[in-house]
Amino acid sequence: MAKRALVTGITGQDGAYLSQLLLEKGYEVHGLVRRSSTADVNTVRLKWLGIDRDVRLVDGNLTDLSGLIRSIREVKPDEVYNLAAQSFVKSSWQQPLLTGSVTGLGVGNILEAVRLEQPDARFYQASSSEMYGLIQEAEQSEETPFYPRSPYAVAKLYGHWLTVNYRESFGLHASSGILFNHESPLRGIEFVTRKVTDGVARIKLGLASELRLGNIDAKRDWGHARDYVIAMWLMLQQDQADDYVVATGRTTTVRDMCRIAFEHAGVEMDAHLVIDPELFRPAEVDVLLGNPAKAKAKLGWEATTSLEDMIREMVDADLKRLKIG
Ligand code: NAP
Ligand code: G4F
């Protein structure tokens, strides 16, 4: 019998790559999608990977407990991956309560649905390095105290601790992946790497003349989403549920990440990059640097894609998309 997985957030970047991985492993993949008037747009990432016809979509919303209970009852998953979230940090200051409701309380809804309907299912929670915020240690590990700096990070912290609590209270096989930033050609256009690779491609093709960014001194530990979904799957294959940092162990400024993109396209960065104070955040996470030692030791997981290779892949994908489009 094929294993069955339910993926919330299947229409997002990670949902698409995780579905591809699970299908390759012979899973039956079900994905929770929120109803939209433009349903054809929803599946664009699954289409990009050529798997939109291979997954089964189930209507549901992370804010709606009764719908989640029905979905879990219907699918009877062996594994549940909770990837759905309002995931854009900057928007979380504009929509703090919605972010809290989806990204925080939503975790409680899906955990409750699993506990009530399918308590033997294994559960993955998409926690975030944003929870470290105002970092308390130069390298962040599973032991580093959290200090969230945005409504998004506060909501993620609630979801993280609730996952730990359900594991300890009810014995659920519930694991939390504290994932550092991961990107790909399927990254949403609002996030900085994709904004840069799309912007550089537009400048290269004469479709734009400048790229406007905020704080380019911020540093992030960037990896490739294709690598990171493997870590999610590995967590649910362990006998014991646990929490893991997933990162590359290298941090780079937004400025240097940008330089890779401009150089790859053969475009002069200083002639086109504009710093826009409007794009700065009310509170910034200045630097993130993950220590993935536990994931390496216990899961045998390691990041395999360099930042340089990933940014070049993203620039090439954006050039291709813009030429076709
Ligand atoms: P993403 O591309 O923004 O995808 C988010 C997904 O959540 C989309 O499928 C979205 O559906 C869905 N969603 C939003 N609100 C929902 C709701 N109320 N009910 C049901 N589904 C809802 O995010 P991602 O980059 O793939 O990240 C996946 C998860 O990992 C997120 O929880 C994110 O916070 C977390 N995370 C990401 C990173 C990273 O660097 N990418 C790092 C750490 C943690 P629509 O398509 O309908 O909008
Ligand atoms: O790409 P970002 O928007 O990602 P951020 O805020 O680090 O959050 C992402 O990673 C988290 C994991 O740590 C996830 F949990 C979260 O869901 C999301 O996937 O911004 C990265 C950095 C920030 O310091 C930001 O201030 O880039 C800086 N930046 C500078 N100019 C910009 C811009 N970010 C964006 N999005 N747009 C700019 O113009």
Image (cartoon, helix red, strand yellow):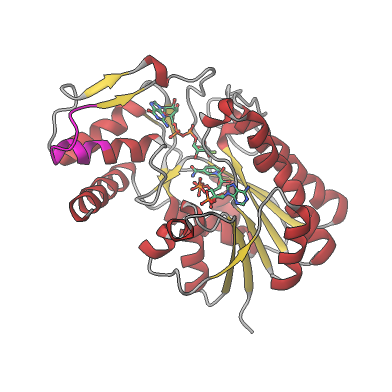
**The image quadrant in which ligand 2 is located:** top left
Whole-percent x and y of residue 284?
Answer: 51, 21
Q: Which residues are drawn in magenta? A: 199-210
Work out which quarter of the rendered image holds the N terminus and state it. Answer: bottom right
Whole-percent x and y of residue 131?
Answer: 62, 32
Whole-percent x and y of residue 294?
Answer: 59, 47
Taking the view exactly as shown, the residue that stands out farthest to the bottom is: 1
Left or right: 260 in relation to 80: left
Q: Quadrant of residue 99?
A: top right
Taking the view exactly as shown, the residue that stands out farthest to the front is: 37
As displayed, is residue 172 above or below residue 179?
below
Is 250 in the magenta? no
Whole-percent x and y of residue 108?
Answer: 76, 47
Q: Residue at x 58, y 56 (%)?
A: 35
Q: Nearer the viewer, residue 273 or 248?
A: 273
Q: Nearer the viewer, residue 17 or 199?
A: 199
Q: Nearer the viewer, residue 1 or 236?
A: 1
Left or right: 100 in relation to 53: right
Q: Residue at x 39, y 51 (%)?
A: 186
